[in-house]
Image (tube, rainbow, N blue to C red):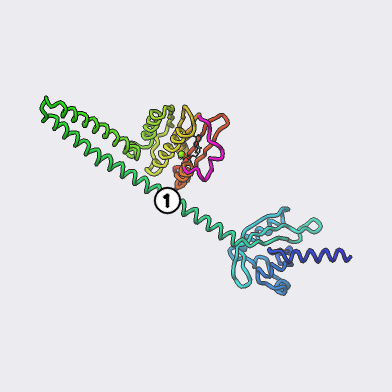
Amino acid sequence: MPLKREYKRNFRELIDHLPQTIFELDIDGKCRFSNQNGYETFGYSEEDIAKGIIFTQLFIPEDRKRVTENVYHILKSKKVEGHEYTAQRKDGSVFHALIFSNPIRHEGSPSGLRGIVIDITDRKQVERELKNSRDELRNLSTHLQSIREEERANIAREIHDELGQSMTALKMDLNWLMKKVLPDQKTVLDKIESMSQLIDSTIQTVRRLSTELRPGLLDDLGLTAAIEWYCGEFQNRTGISCNLKLGQEEITLDQNRAIAIFRIFQETLTNVARHSSATHVDAELAITDHTLNMNIRDNGVGIPEEKIFDPQSLGLIGVRERVYPFGGRVEIQAPVNGGTTVQVTIPLDHKDIT
Ligand SMILES: Nc1ncnc2c1ncn2[C@@H]1O[C@H](COP(=O)(O)OP(=O)(O)O)[C@@H](O)[C@H]1O
Ligand SMILES: [Mg+2]
């Protein structure tokens, strides 16, 4: 029938012009058909195929066992399956291939396999570049965080030690001066008194600044003490009540994890104060099954869904990046019954990436 013949020819043309390889194997895994692209991609000729090429020859030796296993598996199955391999051309050069194939059935039993080979070398390259660039950014962010922490600790120490000591020395000098002034020189005495008060309030400011930069408690008494302290400070400063619940097991963490958790706690409470209009925060800190869990929940308006993974939410990105080197996770949600929850978990038996 001419129509049928024409139809067949069109179909064959269509297949030959496809930019991917279409192939058929017989039941022994021998190639019995390829479209034009297949010859160009793999560098074999029609004569080569006629002489007999086993499908596994088209892959690097390391992949051949897997290819055979998958071919057997596909012959038994009924559905299309996709697999990635490193394919090898006749001249020995290689490329990344994604192959989808399914069995050809003849009177109910499999008589071969038919499929398509897609060259995914470019995609692989882009994937690799993307991964490299993401790794680089991560390393940079971790590096910057640790420099920042170090700097803060140094500045806190300098402010506390240098400024604090100078202020105390000044105060002592003033006391000495006060004793030298005659009692009838009231204006001088008043001046000295007001200078002394100014020094007192400066000493307070120096203390506050240095603790805000880096709570000494965190290094001296550990995470729990620092979090308890910060909770109290937050309450006094914002008027939002903060209830902290600690687990049974004592929380002892290495310095890096302790700083990470403390900074996440700080950022989360700052967000509560800034964005939530909450009146109350519940925080929980516990170790169970070698995992540190910190849950913070406010009773405010709830974080807008789109803000959770918004690339502009730099505070939240920072929070996630903080736990990344420890294999940790951060889940931020706005539960239906109101408020915002931030759940942080850090496995304590994980090997750090940094
Ligand atoms: N507890 C919260 N309640 C309501 N909205 C929140 C809360 N925490 C964060 N958000 C929202 O998520 C956004 C991103 O937070 P964040 O990344 O910390 O950025 P920033 O605090 O600098 O605005 C905030 O701008 C705010 O809209
Ligand atoms: Mg923030």
Count of labels in the image: 1
Q: Nearer the viewer, residue 295 or 47?
A: 295
Kindly give the residue lying farthest to the bottom in the view shown.
Answer: 47
- Classify residue 60 as left or right of residue 168: right
Q: Nearer the viewer, residue 176 or 118?
A: 176
Give the image location of residue 257, x and y in percent: 41, 42
In the image, what residue type sits under mark 1? Thr
**Secondary element at image label 1:** loop
For residue 140, above or below residue 307: below
Relative image position of residue 141 (x, y in whole percent) = 44, 49
- Figure quadrant of the N terminus: bottom right
Q: Residues within 10 Å of mark 1 (few under 14, many from 20)?
A: few
Q: Residue at x 33, y 40 (%)?
A: 219
- Main SS category, magenta section: loop
In magenta segment, residue 57? no
- Which residue is tagged 1? 354
Q: Is mark 1 within 8 Å of ligand 1?
A: no
Q: Is residue 309 magenta?
A: yes
Against 255, residue 338 (above or below) is above
Answer above or below: position of 10 versus 176. below
- Which residue lies at the image location 71% right of the left edge and 71% below the top edge? 49
Q: Position of residue 92 (x, y in %)?
A: 60, 71
Q: Which quarter of the picture shows residue 169?
A: top left
Question: Magenta span covers which residues?
Answer: 300-314
Residue sticking out furthest to the front: 187
Q: Position of residue 152 (x, y in %)?
A: 34, 44
Q: Locate residue 153 relative to residue 178 in the image: left or right.
A: right
